[in-house]
Amino acid sequence: MTADKIHTDLQKAFELLSREPLDRYTSFRVGGLADLLAQPRDRQTLKALLRAAGEKDLPITIIGGGTNTLISDKGIRGLVIVLKKLKSSPSIIEDITGENTIQIKADAGERLSTICRLALDNGLSGLEFAAGIPGTLGGAIYMNAGTPSRDISQAIISLDLINSSTLKFQTIEKKDLEFSYRQLKTHNMIILGAVLSLKKTDPEIVKKNFEKNLKIKNTSQPVSQASAGCFFKNPSPENPAGKLIERAGLKGKQINGARISDLHANFIVNEGNARCEDILALKNMVQETVFEKYKIKLETEVKVIGE
């Protein structure tokens, strides 16, 4: 069966977009074309997509909100599944323990900002650190999003997942999950939803802490420019990547449309006409310069995907 016939069959069975520009699905605003792209709205449709793609040996790439992703200028072959429409209204599960612990149950496609707002409106503490972090809940969990003081794994009770190979749905408790710094090992599992544990607290205290964190983010990071957030992992608390890059004299360095932010050196921003190759060239310059000066290898936090 030809590739065109496979694509046509899948397009007939599902609402798929063909040769879809991927720059509109990432916060970096770069990326080539997807052969096929789907945005399932429920778990059963996602399962059917995975089964159909597997039967036709079609490669699958999963994208959440695209806020920590850099896509190749050549695009992505096979089927791209975007999960940001996989959501329903998050729900609050009231405390039954007498310990002021409240749970929020939400789908992976829900925006993290929506979950934070729900917590804020209900005086629930535990997500203040996430103020201003873009993207979906699923993406935040997959990257174990956080700050130096806290990350989202600390709020997780359990995850709903689907095994992309066996197509079995599973719920896995936190104790059986492999979280580490800025990552969760998923072992062919796709995150579908989560249950979070938060503490009932004085709403004014939650609001104050949330607004303080949001102000810090808005004044210290280039939030109005196209980027993927912090580009490199921090080697250690004593040597944050941004400080190393700044000390190396790289702030403001630019390759075509890609620039190291003047506001925060661990951000590479798209000035409007950057390509993936420009961003990668700047990434390589940073890694080589920092290693040459400090003998420290910077690892990327942003996921680079595509052909």
Image (tube, helix red, strand yellow):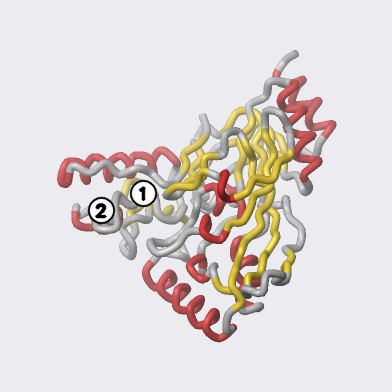
As drawn, the residue found furthest toward the top would be 1
Mark 2 crowd level (few <14, some 14–19, many ≥20, 10 Å Cα) = many
Q: Which residue is mark 1?
A: 232
As drawn, the residue found furthest toward the left would be 293
**Residue 100 visible within the image:** yes
Task: Locate residue 9: give its quadrant.
Answer: top right
Q: Quadrant of the N terminus?
A: top right
| Residue 282 pos. (x, y %) | 32, 44
* Residue at (44, 62) in percent of width and height: 150
Badge 1 vs badge 2, beta-carbon distance below 8 Å:
yes
| Residue 95 pos. (x, y %) | 70, 71
Q: Earlier in the sequence, mark 1 or mark 2?
A: 1
Q: Nearer the viewer, residue 278 or 297?
A: 297
Classify 40 as above or below 105: above
| Residue type, numbered disc 2 | Ile
Secondary structure beneath dot 2 equals helix
* Residue at (80, 40) in percent of width and height: 45
Q: Nearer the viewer, residue 300 or 182?
A: 182
Classify 268 as above or below 32: below
Q: Nearer the viewer, residue 184 or 300?
A: 184
* Residue at (76, 63) in percent of width and height: 89
Task: Locate residue 147: give its quadrant.
Answer: bottom left
**Residue 24 visible within the image:** no
| Residue type, numbered disc 1 | Phe
Q: Nearer the viewer, residue 161 or 114?
A: 161
Q: Which residue is mark 2?
A: 245
- Drawn side of residue 129 relative to residue 105, left or right: left
What whole-number distance in Å separates the C-alpha atoms at marks 1 and 2?
Answer: 10 Å
- Drawn side of residue 227 relative to residue 15, left or right: left
Secondary structure beneath dot 1 equals loop
